[in-house]
Image (tube, helix red, strand yellow):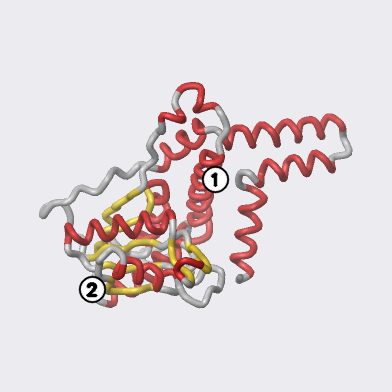
C-alpha cells in the first residue's frame, strides 16, 4: 500500500462513521475533565446512532443522487464511448481461484453491458491496483464483462487508484483516439464527484448512473429510526463521496485553468 493510500485509509477509519464515533469515545475516555468526558461520550453514542439509522442514509443519498437514469435514443446523445469505473475487488476468491469483482463492481459492469447492447458503443474500463495488487481492477473488469456479460471491451485503463485518476488517465486514452463525449457508468450516489472529475479532465459527460437508492419496506415508519448495519454502510459511503468531492475541489479543481486537464 502506498503512503497516500495508507493515509487515506487511516483518515477514513478515524473520521467517517463508525470510526468517528469510536474516536469521540476514545477521546472521552482520555479526557481529564469530567464535563468534557460526558460531552464526548454523548457525542460518540449520538453520532453512532445517527449514522446507523436508515433515515440518515436516505437523506444523505437524496443529496447525492441528483442525476436521473440516462435516456436512450438516436437524438438523445452524441456519446462515443461508455466508461465504467471499477469498485469492490473480491481478493483471493477461492471459488474463482483468484481475484475477481463483487457487489458494487458487478452492478456497474452489468449496467455497462446492458448499455452497450442498446447503444453499440465501445467500452473503456478504468481501475488500477489500488492497494498494490498484482492485477489491476480494469483487467478483472474486462474479464467479467467479456466472459460473463457477453460485452466487448475496447480500452483498458489500469493505472488509476482514485476517481480523479480514473478521469485523468481515461481522458488521455480517449482523447488519443478522438473520443470527446462519453456515457459514464458509476453508482447514482457516486456520480456527482465522478462526472465533475471527467468534465474537468476535458470530456463531455452523459451521466449513466446505476444502483439508485430505494426505500425498503423494512425501513418504513418507525423502522427508519432503528439502527442497522446496511444503513451505516450507506451513510459511510455517502459521507465518503461528499468529503471526497470537497477534497477534489480543494486539491485539484480550485485552480483549474482552461487547459481541459486538471492540475497535477
- Report helix, strand or loop for mark 1: helix
The residue that mark 2 highlights is: 178
**Is residue 62 visible in the rendered structure shown here?**
yes
Residue 244 point in image, percent of width and height:
51, 53
Label 1 vs label 2, nearer the camera: 1
Tag 2 or tag 1, which sits nearer the N-term?
2
Residue 203 point in image, percent of width and height:
30, 63
Task: Determine whether 141 is above or below 217 in the image.
Answer: below
Task: Determine whether 26 is above or below 223 in the image.
Answer: below
How packed mark 2 is, by other alpha carbons closer than 10 Å (few <14, some 14-19, many 20 or more), is few
Residue 47 point in image, percent of width and height:
64, 35
Name the residue located 49 percent from the left edge and 57 percent from the top edge: 248
**Separation of residues labelled 1 and 2 (CA atoms):** 38 Å
Left or right, 70 with respect to 95, comes to: left
Name the residue located 24 percent from the left edge and 62 percent from the top edge: 181
The residue furthest front is 95
The residue that mark 1 highlights is: 236
Residue 72 point in image, percent of width and height:
17, 51
Name the residue located 33 percent from the left edge and 64 percent from the top edge: 202
Amino acid at each position: 500500500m502506498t503512503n497516500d493510500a495508507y493515509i487515506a485509509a487511516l483518515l477514513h477509519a478515524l473520521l467517517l462513521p463508525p470510526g468517528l464515533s469510536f474516536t469521540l469515545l476514545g477521546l472521552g475516555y482520555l479526557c481529564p475533565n469530567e464535563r468534557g468526558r460526558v460531552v464526548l461520550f454523548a457525542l460518540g453514542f449520538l453520532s453512532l446512532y445517527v449514522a446507523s439509522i436508515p433515515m440518515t442514509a436516505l437523506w444523505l443519498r437524496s443529496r447525492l443522487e441528483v442525476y436521473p437514469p440516462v435516456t436512450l435514443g438516436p437524438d438523445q446523445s452524441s456519446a462515443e464511448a461508455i466508461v465504467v469505473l471499477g469498485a469492490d475487488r473480491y481478493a483471493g476468491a477461492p471459488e474463482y481461484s483468484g481475484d475477481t469483482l463483487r457487489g458494487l463492481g458487478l452492478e456497474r459492469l452489468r449496467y455497462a453491458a446492458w448499455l452497450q447492447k442498446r447503444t453499440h458503443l465501445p467500452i473503456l474500463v478504468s481501475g488500477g491496483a489500488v492497494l498494490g495488487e498484482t492485477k489491476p481492477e480494469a483487467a478483472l473488469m474486462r474479464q467479467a464483462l467479456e466472459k460473463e456479460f457477453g460485452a466487448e471491451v475496447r480500452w483498458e485503463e489500469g493505472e488509476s487508484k482514485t476517481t480523479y485518476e480514473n478521469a485523468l488517465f481515461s481522458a488521455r486514452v480517449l482523447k488519443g483516439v478522438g473520443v470527446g463525449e462519453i456515457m459514464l457508468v458509476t453508482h447514482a450516489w457516486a456520480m456527482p464527484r465522478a462526472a465533475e472529475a471527467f468534465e474537468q479532465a476535458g470530456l463531455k459527460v452523459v451521466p449513466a448512473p446505476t444502483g439508485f437508492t430505494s426505500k425498503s419496506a423494512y425501513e418504513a415508519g418507525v423502522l427508519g429510526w432503528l439502527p442497522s448495519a446496511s444503513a451505516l454502510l450507506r451513510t459511510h459511503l455517502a459521507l465518503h463521496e461528499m468529503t471526497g468531492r470537497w477534497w477534489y475541489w480543494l486539491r485539484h479543481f480550485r485552480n483549474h485553468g482552461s487547459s481541459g486537464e486538471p492540475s497535477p
